[in-house]
Image: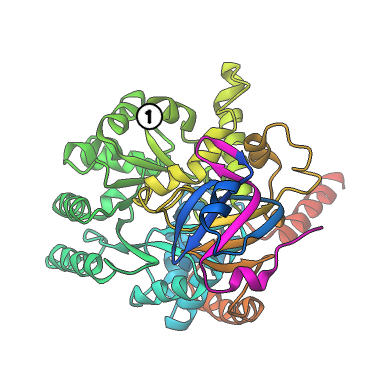
Amino acid sequence: MNHPDRDRLFAPGPLLLVPDAVLLAEGPADDWAVVVEGDRFQDVGPADELTHRHRQLRPIRLTGKLLMAGFVDAHHHLTQSFGAALAFGEPSEIFRRVWVPLEGALDEESAYTAAKLAALEALRGGFTTIADAGTRADVDVEVVASAARDAGIRCVLGLVCNDADEGADANAGAAALDNAEKHLARYADDPLVHPSLAISIPEAATERTLRATAKLAAEAGAVVQIHVNEHLAGVERSLVRNGLRPLEHLHSIGALGPQLLAAHATLLTPRELTLLADTGTAVSYNPVASAWKGNAVAPATAMAERGIRFGLGTDGTRGDGFRLMEAAEFAQRLAYGLAGGDSSSGAGWTWLEHACSGGADAVGLGARTGTIAQGMAADFLLVDTDTPELGLSWDLPWELVRRGNRDQITAVFVAGRLRMWQGQPVDWDGPALVRRAVELSRAVVGRADVTRIHPTATAARALHRAQKRSAAQ
């Protein structure tokens, strides 16, 4: 199998890359090329035109490769990676029993390692951008920013601005807003880390702070990330407290708008769909999280039809962009397509688009990344199409959604630099990080007051067999 030379791709640019095809917004374009200079695409077009226009550059032929935009993870929790499997088999609202105590047990080194481990998994899965919804670890958020930078991934970095949590004092709101302004300024010019504000759920902040963070983010061109209408319990809490569902409450106080990234939004009424469409609010559609711990699947095909902005998010479940697209389509087909006789359920391209450009738009970076075009950030993948899954191609966008997989990603570029080659970082030691994460995670989980309802798979099997034997006696 013909692979490009890693050393040539890792060398300083400009680079003239000539793959078999480039995946554009309109679809795959055969015999196209790109010029990467600095952190951006300097030129994109037909290969013969680019090789003529840039005769000073030696073309790098990428036979059997597709060049496509990197995936955007529109919803992640980077410092929860040590406890990924602790949530398996658990009911919906696990943040109080698992995530809050787990993140509370992190120190600076373990928070950095957990975040970098999540970034490593994301890069291996083809994500070039991740939106972190804010950590509850008692560390400076720069720890998470450093982990993302050191890993080489673009990060929309949330700062938690809750001021109505249990035990919050009268000055919590003023402090939260002061920290929010400093956070937005701190990362305003960072090439890889883009500031965002975050509120865990609407009830975790006062109405004043909800309105103020929306205004601050809108003025800064950033997003506010809030978990909205995710679980039945959350909807009921809001109804009891405010007389309105969470999304309705945010609308009533003026917090909806293009600056809001509503995480999950699985439980939506027809009126709430209209509110999203009318206000330009964005959503992160997290299909794997819905399957693993949710009460419902967000109506993403309806969102697409209504022009509601949305991206695809992992919620930290697994960092594989291809499997995320497949889950997005599969969940819509099971939840809505089968009942309505919709055999298309997005026609493939919907999930590919919202995994890349739609996701970039949802996290506030639509003018910077998510598309292969001149002037855009050179965040892209080289995907091996000379494989049993993709070699006999009849409809490449559909095939990427249903038959693509992480193993086919040869290279991952972020901001014009080669970051991953055949699943491993090119300029730092990935296996060493995993080994250190294993060591640290044992201590962190050991001291965290994590409460699980269900036993491990092995213990559950033993219990099941014991019950079967008891019933037979």
> Is residue 98 in sight in this rendering?
no
Question: Is-magenta flag for residue 18?
Answer: yes
Above or below 119: residue 231: above
Q: Please report the residue visible at 37 percent of the width from the left and 33 percent of the height from the top.
A: 308
Q: Please report the residue visible at 49 percent of the width from the left and 79 percent of the height from the top.
A: 110
Q: Position of residue 321 (x, y in %)?
A: 59, 51
Q: Which quarter of the figure has residue 154? A: bottom left
Residue at the top extreme?
A: 341
Q: Position of residue 292 (x, y in %)?
A: 58, 47
The residue nearer to you, when weighing 263 against 230, is 263
Identify the residue under disc 1: 307
Q: Please report the residue visible at 72 percent of the width from the left and 56 percent of the height from the top.
A: 407
The residue nearer to you, when weighing 66 against 366, is 66
Q: Please report the residue visible at 45 percent of the width from the left and 51 percent of the height from the top.
A: 93
Type of amino acid at the residue the image marks with label 1: Gly
Q: Position of residue 455 (x, y in %)?
A: 65, 59
Residue at the right extreme?
A: 473
Looking at the rendered structure, the secondary structure element under dot 1 is: loop
Horizontally, residue 114 falls left or right of residue 263, namely right
> Is residue 279 in sight in this rendering?
yes
Q: What segment carries the magenta color? A: 1-28
Please, which colouring scheme is shown? rainbow
Q: Residues within 10 Å of mark 1 (few under 14, many from 20)?
A: few
